[in-house]
Amino acid sequence: MDGTPAPATGPKLKQSLMTGKFLHNAWYVAAWAEELPVGKLLARTILGEPIVIYRKSDDTIAALEDRCPHRFAPLSMGKVLPGDRLQCPYHGLEFDAAGACVLNPHGAKNIPSRAKVKTFPIVEKHKAAWIWMGDKPADPAKIPDFSALDNVPELHVMPFDSIHVKANYELIVDNLLDVSHTSYLHEGLLGNKETVESETPVEQDGNDVIVSRYSPNATPPGMFAQFWPGVPARIDKFSRTRWMAPCYLVLFTGICELGAPQESGTGYFGIHMLTPEYPQSTHYFFTAVRWGVRTGDEENRVLRRTVAEQRRFAFEQQDGPVIEAQQVVINEATRQLDPTILSVDVGPVRYKRVLEKLLAAERD
């Protein structure tokens, strides 16, 4: 402990990142929508399931198990034929978007009853393709709220990006909900020494967990200073991160004049969409939407590129190596790990409780 009263009462938070526990009855991002032009096959493993995804001629998206029922060749190595048929690369069997075999080119051309492929509900919303991995009915109304991405000027949105992280998705959620690390791991870019001492209230909205962080009278970090021509030497910095089960986060963050309303300042919505690949690997989709924009179009074109580069650097070169190193340390542990809890861990402890409750309900 760090001298602050424990943020969570009850059982200690045990290390449980190696169990491969996934919430299946939930929507996950399979890809950015722009990754799916008509005719292209995209292979992606989600919750340990190999999936092939493609856009049909009517602009909707199909998702099938990436495994031909004949010799188990990846269908993603095949091609899309007219009529949205998916042809296996090995023996030419053809499947429709509903997973039914519609052509066997061999012998008498009989189609065995077992010649079918599992399909998954998939819809396009908030600039992404969302896939449902569970056995309960898929309700698109339950897709997490990323409406910050909708109806926004192109120059105010960073390019849609992603990285592959060799670690359990919970380690990444821990990182994103604990904004205190920005003062150290991202010093000068997202935080600085003056943002170490900050208020960090936590609240819960249904199953959503919201972690806020306020750093009044601080020097503006570099990421935010570039948004504000003539930025004051001292500002109030703030962030509010909403976690939505099982692994999605929206970060509202920015700076404003001392004592002024937050909405009068400038900043961005950080979009973080995590999709587990395997228990120890994660597809990490991210972008950002600026708000309170104070710069003109020419500056915005430059900022769109530079901010995207800065954010990718922060995730790929600063967060990523530490998180992957954590996973290695966890893997090599010779005893049950029981992490020390600090005051900055209130948010991570709270979301893990919600996640465990949802996992238990799904098991039951």
Image (spheres, rainbow, N blue to C red):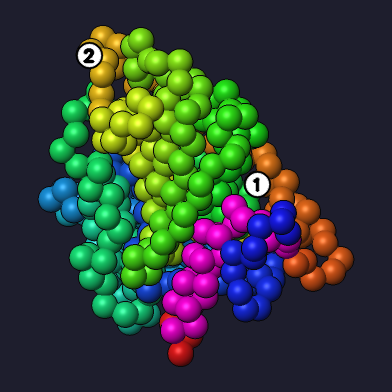
The residue sitting at the right extreme is 334
**What amino acid is at disc 1?**
Ile
Left of 203 or right of it: where is 283?
A: right
Q: Is residue 240 visible?
A: yes
**Pick the front one: 347 or 3:** 3
Q: Residue drawn at (67%, 39%), measured in percent from left and top? A: 321
What kind of element bears circle 1?
Answer: helix
Q: Residue drawn at (66%, 57%), measured in percent from left and top? A: 4
Left of 180 or right of it: where is 211?
A: left
Tell me, yes or no, whether the highlighted magenta stretch contains residue 202: no
**What amino acid is at disc 2?**
Asp
Per the image, the residue denoted by label 1 is 323
Q: Is residue 94 visible?
A: no
The kind of secondary structure the magenta stretch mainly shows is: helix
Per the image, the residue denoted by label 2 is 297
**Pick the front one: 61 or 169:** 169
Q: How far apart in space, not on screen, are marks 1 and 2 (Cα)? A: 36 Å
State the image coordinates of residue 280 (x, y, percent, origin top left): 63, 58
Q: Residue drawn at (69%, 67%), measured in percent from left and top? A: 15
Q: Earlier in the sequence, mark 1 or mark 2?
A: 2
What kind of element bears circle 2?
Answer: helix
Tell me, yes or no, whether the highlighted magenta stretch contains residue 349: yes
Q: Quadrant of the N terminus?
A: bottom right
Q: Residues within 10 Å of mark 2 (few under 14, many from 20)?
A: few
Q: Residue drawn at (47%, 54%), measured in percent from left and top? A: 201
State the image coordinates of residue 29 (x, y, percent, origin top left): 37, 54
Magenta stretch bounds: 339-361
Left of 40 or right of it: where is 182?
A: right
State the image coordinates of residue 146 (x, y, percent, origin top left): 28, 50
**Pick the front one: 30 or 89:** 30
State the image coordinates of residue 31 (x, y, percent, origin top left): 36, 48
